[in-house]
Image (tube, rainbow, N blue to C red):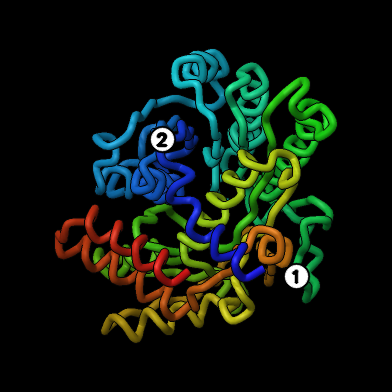
Amino acid sequence: MEGLVEMMRQKPERFYKGKRVLVTGHTGFKGGWLSLWLLKFGAQVTGYALKPAPGPNFFNILNLRNHMHSVTGDIRDKKKLQLFFKDFKPEIVIHMAAQSLVRQSYQDPIMTYETNVMGTVNVLNICREFSGVRAIVNVTSDKCYENQGKNKSYKETDSMGGFDPYSSSKGCAELVTTAYQKSFFAKEKYNKDHRAAIASARAGNVIGGGDWNKDRLIPDCIRVIFGKENLVIRYPNAIRPWQYVLEPLYGYLLLAMRLYEDGPTFSGPWNFGPGKKNEKTVKWILEKFKESWDGFSWEIEVQPQPHESASLRLNSYKAESLLGWHPKLGLVKALKETVQWYQAWHDKVDMNALSLNQIKNYMQDI
């Protein structure tokens, strides 16, 4: 068993070389890091996504547009997406494009559902039309679960749900994935009617350098540090499963590889959450930032806020036992890597070299 796991750890570098990989949402935080990693492996990477958000962002800071084929498009635009698939002919599809903010889902629920649900339907349905697609990973969220407020870790077999429009839309996206898996990518029809295997992936609260999204704790802290803004915290005692960005991304890479090589054996939902030691309160994270930067402070929001779960945990035993994936970085080290990235950006360091070095260091850790 140990030898098998070791083989799996080494294999992605060889496996992805030359593979045609489509990443939707590549201009986002996680999509940018995944694209960079695939490029490092020697994959032929093409991205389909909206333009990067205004202001600093990972995609533009690393100038990834000059290193990969990048197409600007909306996953709700079915015709453009079809033409894109026809042109690129992907072998592996990692679907990450989404409306990913809880607060924005309250402000624009229709767009949230159109993007996260019907956008996913478009991607999966077009994958049916192209026989060259071998592996599909639909990245959703840990918030897809029906959070009952209990002190438990959610397993892949637990019910889908969601209080807010964002969480609900991710639960819907999971149901769509399951329906397509059973109806169009069924195990018993593999190598007969189709050659594609499909899975969904759920991760926790991801942190790392290059995230500039609003209403996320780490980017909000960075804006305070470099912009001298006030930081207002809504739920200081909320417990979250924090994890370094490369942790779940490595899980996605392993999962896509196994889907490609072993087919529907690895189909279905997968959790990629951090260990229990990384489950900390928002206030704990803030205190760590205070240790790194003098004068860092925050205040508590006293106005009524939208519903937000007090605790959310993932059970990742399935990924650990069947994929050989394990969370490796403790939260202190994850924060250190994150702070180092933003400080380097502020100091105008070569961010391509630094980001690739962080990937290299992580691969050595695993």
Q: CA distance from mark 1 to mark 2?
A: 38 Å
Q: Nearer the viewer, residue 220 or 250?
A: 250
Residue lying at 44% horizontally and 78% vertically, measured from the top left? 286
Nearer the N terminus, badge 1 or badge 2?
Answer: 2
Q: Residue 236 at x, y = what percent? A: 55, 76
From the top left corner, tell me how far across and down residue 98 is, in percent.
55, 40
Q: What amino acid is labelled 1 in the image?
A: Ser
Q: Relative to residue 31, is residue 244 depicted above or below?
A: below
Residue 295 left/right relative to 309: left
Callout 2 secondary element: loop
Residue at image position (54%, 69%) is 242
The amino acid marked with disc number 2 is: Gly
Q: Position of residue 156 (x, y in %)?
A: 77, 56
**Total number of numbered labels?**
2
CB-based contact (under 8 Å), mark 1 and mark 2: no
- Estimate how packed mark 1 is, as few (under 14), some (14 to 19) or many (20 or more) residues with alpha carbons within 10 Å: some
173 up-or-down from 153: above or below: above
Q: Is residue 244 above or below residue 48?
A: below
> Secondary structure under badge 1?
strand
Residue 164 in sight: yes
Residue 18 numbered mark, or none: 2
Q: From the viewer's perspective, is 164 left or right of 283?
A: right
Residue 304 appears anywhere in the view: no
Please give the name of the residue rendered at 52% of the width and 38% of the height, measured from the top-left corner.
Answer: 97
Dot 2 crowding, Cα within 10 Å, few <14, some 14–19, many 20+: some
Residue at the extreme left: 348
Quadrant where the N terminus sits is bottom right
Residue 148 found in image quarter = bottom right
Label of residue 153 in the image:
1
Q: Return the x and y of residue 227 as percentages of the image width and height.
A: 25, 64
**Residue toward you, 365 or 145:** 365
